[in-house]
Amino acid sequence: MSKLRIGSRGSQLALWQANHISTLLRARGHEVEIEIIHTTGDKITDVALAMVGTKGMFTKEIEEALADGHVDLAVHSLKDLPTELPPGFEIAAVTKREDARDAFCSRLYSNIENLSRGARVGTSSLRRQAQLKAIRPDVDIHPLRGNVDTRLRKLEQGKYDAIILASAGLNRLGKTELIRQIIPAQIMCPAAGQGALAIEIRDADSGTRQHVEFLNDDAARAATTCERALLNRLGGGCQVPIGAFAEMRNGKLHLEAIVADPDGSKVLRESRDGNFSDPEQLGNDVGETLLARGGEEILEAVYGCGLALPPQP
């Protein structure tokens, strides 16, 4: 079998993901190497992500290595991938999804509702911030950057009373001790693609496509395609206050989505069922509805303040 080179970020979670995929590929008889590539997002650690105006900040350098033929495939957290890939690349597979929901982590409190007034909560996500502020406007939200270990260590050191992280990353790394609440999507709608891994390749590389196609999970592909269609319709990158979560319910693809003002003063929610066979249509339709209900004004204000990534083409 062929030798495959995987491009990955160097964080503990990114390497877990790359090693997970490499194990599956080795089981098929491939020789696999992992190449660590440092991205723009990895180098900017002292600024909240929402203030960084670089599209694809966790993927650009990896895609350059793909384009040069230095690596054969890249393993990404799907939520980090822009909804429109640069020319020359494709998502060859979306793996079986981990829990897409967010996790409330704390040493002191059992859930969001029990937070004391003025509690210090860490997150650098405008999406999480907006939804938390909507239900708990009395807590203080502070920026939180770094890898999973760094964020958990800051919590354990008492720098935060609670932090909010993706359940998927905590589960994958086995760092679940401080999880106190898995937040329902109806309370905190996840980011589009959260919990899923994407395998990116050069779009003309049919050989690698054939090697990785067994990794694709149809349910995860449909759900995340729907979520990313909504995100694309709203012109949003991964750091804007937009949430999207799709799943199968009673034979239909069900989508929950939100657009929110960063201060939580206005949260627009929309849910709808659609056909599993046409996930993009469902995402586009819900996106149109949210824009018509006031989402366009919210997003224009966010972009105008320079708080988020510029709209994608």
Image (cartoon, rainbow, N blue to C red):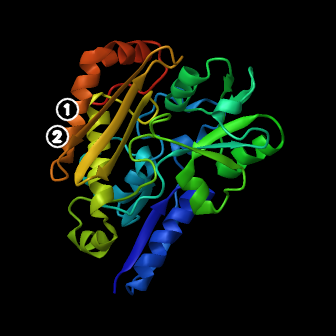
Q: Is residue 90 visible?
A: no
At 24% from the left and 73% from the top, the residue drawn is: 210
> Residue 145, image x and y in percent?
65, 38
Q: How many numbered marks does the figure carry?
A: 2
Residue most toward the right?
A: 157
Relative to residue 225, is residue 194 drawn left or right? right
Determine whether the residue tagged by mark 2 lies in a helix, strand or loop.
helix
Q: Which residue is mark 1?
A: 285
Q: Would you place residue 206 above or below residue 89 in this image?
A: below
Q: Would you place residue 122 above or below residue 223 in this image?
A: above
Q: Which residue is mark 2?
A: 281
> Residue 53, image x and y in percent?
47, 28
Residue most toward the front?
A: 250
Q: Is residue 66 visible?
A: yes
Tell me the crowding category of disc 2: few under 14, some 14 to 19, or many 20 or more residues within 10 angstroms, Cα based: some
Q: Nearer the viewer, residue 69 or 13?
A: 13
Q: Nearer the viewer, residue 81 or 279?
A: 279
Residue type of the residue flagged with mark 1: Asp
Q: Are marks 2 and 1 in contact (CB under 8 Å)?
A: yes
At 79% from the left and 39% from the top, the residue drawn is: 108
Residue type of the residue flagged with mark 2: Gln
State how far apart marks 2 and 1 are (Cα): 6 Å
Q: Would you place residue 23 above or below residue 259 in this image?
A: below
